[in-house]
Image: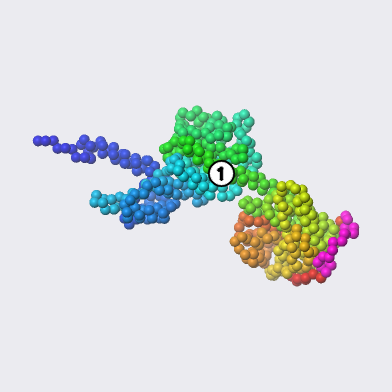
Amino acid sequence: MAAQAPRPGIPGTANAHTAVNTAAALHGLVNGSGLGLAVWDTGLRCVWANEALTGYDGIPVAARLGRPPREALAGDADDTETTVRRVLATGAPVTGREFRVPTTGGQGDRHGVLSASYLRLDDADGRPLGVCLLVLPVGGRWWAGDRLAVVSEAGARIGTSLDVMRTAQELADFTVPLIADYVTVDLTEAVRLGEEPLERFGPSRGRVPTFRRAGRASIHTGSPESLWGSGEVVYVPEDSPFMEVLASGRPVLQPLLDADHDAWLEKDPARAEKIREFGMHSLLIVPVQARGVLLGVAVFVRTRNPTPFDESDELLAEELVARAALTLDNARRYTRERTAALALQHSLLPRRVSGGRAMDVATRYLPADDEYNVGGDWFDVIGLPGGRLALVVGDVVGHGINAAATMGRLRTAIRTLADLDLPPGELLTRLDRTFVGLAEENDDDGAATEPSPGATCAYAVYEPATRTCTVALAGHPPPAVVDPDGGVTFPDLPHGTSLGVALLPYESGEVRLPENGVIAFYTDGLVEDRRHDIDIGMARLSDALGRRAASLEELCAAVIDTLPTTTPADDVTLLLARDRRDRPPAADPPAPPGADLPLPPTGPTGDVSCRPGRHVDG
């Protein structure tokens, strides 16, 4: 009797070993290859997915099952569902399709790029059973034919602000998994503080500078490969590829990284352990440099992607890092200028103000958001003869050191003119002429400086005996008057042009404060907002000033708290003043030096002391 041929796949037969090996290979393909897989039935319900796909878009397997592609996938889900429907209907596979998903290690809506293929699954009779999605990490060469598109997209995604930490994070987010599976960006402390970094670093230059982790991204949630969190100081080992990059300013490419045989890792056991734990097998370190100075290093590592780094990866990484470096250097210069402008402004603003025996005063100053730089707001309270008080709030147009310096010159000029005890209208007229003279001096210098900006100013003199404020405005919003019952009015006062125009003399008007009333001066940053009409800001200010408060300081805080944002686009200044009911009688203070000298003629003014003003009751 002839021997029966063994049946395929039955244990104990000649094909048993082959069947076992095939099952093991399939298990490795599905669970250990890094290939993301998902299957949808003909009703577009997800019936199966593997864990590798979760590693790419962060959605657990259980959350996918029973859902259509637009709900079962992150990133370009709508486009994916359209493709799945087309493949299911036509049977034509789609391969190598770009598929974008949010990266798991960064911040915000930064996206990584994967390669997706779609295949229809048919039964033995050719009837469709569903569609299989296969997702792969992009290799180092997928973009070779479209480098310009990648670099162009990097320009849109990297450097969206003048924040060095955010820019570094954007670089890390964009390059995972585009180039690497894990990326870090470390910057010198000098860059973060806006100082000047050195051209090169190295043992011969002495102590290694302090680096801080500014950006990190990974295919793994939370970037567990990183030894340091964002903002933490990073250890830079000597005799390592990192020091080689810092000393030479050139990239270092290490296609094969081996924690057990690379000598430099013997002195860095913590880093070596991370390399072993996550299977880091290829390393690329690129200097972050711009305009001849080294700002830090960007480190690219491959773990899941099996392809070692090569020269084409290095070239693309250099291009992307160079784009980020220019933004980082601009941000560093901006930080330095902002720091200098803030220091200058704070040195010029009064450290404390006092209304003496005439008034209780409270002030608030809130600098503009980092994105817009410091402005030129200022305030002042100046004692005058006869127990009177001068209240000043001003705003120089523009931002930066130029605006802060102009503010300082104007504040000094006002104090000098206040010593002459001029009426408010005449004081602003002289200040306007002084401002025009300063601008002409700058123009005559021929230096390559910014033109002198314009400015607005409110100058008021308070007479305690009559509770009367004489106010002159140079392009400035009117003050608000608050009565004891919480009623708020904005007096109709003569409104002159901004300083620097020198067209007509300034007029003034009188405002009589009610007993225990408050007068509020402010800059436009308190009431103007790019997203809302100024009337909305004035109404918000009126509502805030009408609230009951135990003190002026409390009222100041309440007004600032009503701002629609804690990071305004313009400086915010607020000056509140209230007549002191407990004011003791006092003799007039001595006149300031030179107050009795004759004044040069200035032409007619519109001050109430010279011509009738407009009287407004509070």
Q: Would you say 78 lies left or right of 433 here?
A: left
Q: Quadrant of residue 165?
A: top right
Please tell me which residue is depicted at 37% across the width and 41% down the height of the picture. Answer: 32
State the colouring used for the structure image.
rainbow
Please tell me which residue is depicted at 85% across the width and 58% down the height of the picture. Answer: 420
The amino acid type of the residue labelled 1 equals Ala
Say few, some or many: other residues with alpha carbon within 10 Å of mark 1 (under 14 / 14 to 19 / 20 or more): many
Q: Position of residue 342 (x, y in %)?
A: 69, 49
* Residue designated by label 1: 324
Chain part drawn in magenta: 593-611
Q: Position of residue 227 (x, y in %)?
A: 52, 39
Q: Position of residue 170 (x, y in %)?
A: 53, 46
In this rendering, the answer to whether 164 lies above or below 209 is below
In this rendering, the answer to whether 98 lies above or below 609 is above
Q: Would you say 536 lies left or right of 67 here?
A: right
Q: Position of residue 172 (x, y in %)?
A: 51, 44
User: What secondary structure is the magenta-colored segment mainly?
Assistant: loop
Q: Would you say 281 lies left or right of 452 here?
A: left
Q: Quarter holding the N terminus?
A: top left
Please tell me which residue is depicted at 40% across the width and 53% down the height of the picture. Answer: 80
Residue that lies at the very extreme toward the right in this rendered image: 597
In depth, the one of 263 and 472 nearer the eye is 472
In depth, the one of 81 and 71 nearer the eye is 81
Q: Which element is circle 1 on?
A: helix
In this rendering, the answer to whether 514 lies above or below 324 is below
In depth, the one of 222 and 115 nearer the eye is 115
Q: Would you say 221 lies left or right of 439 here?
A: left
Please tell me which residue is depicted at 47% across the width and 49% down the height of the picture. Answer: 102
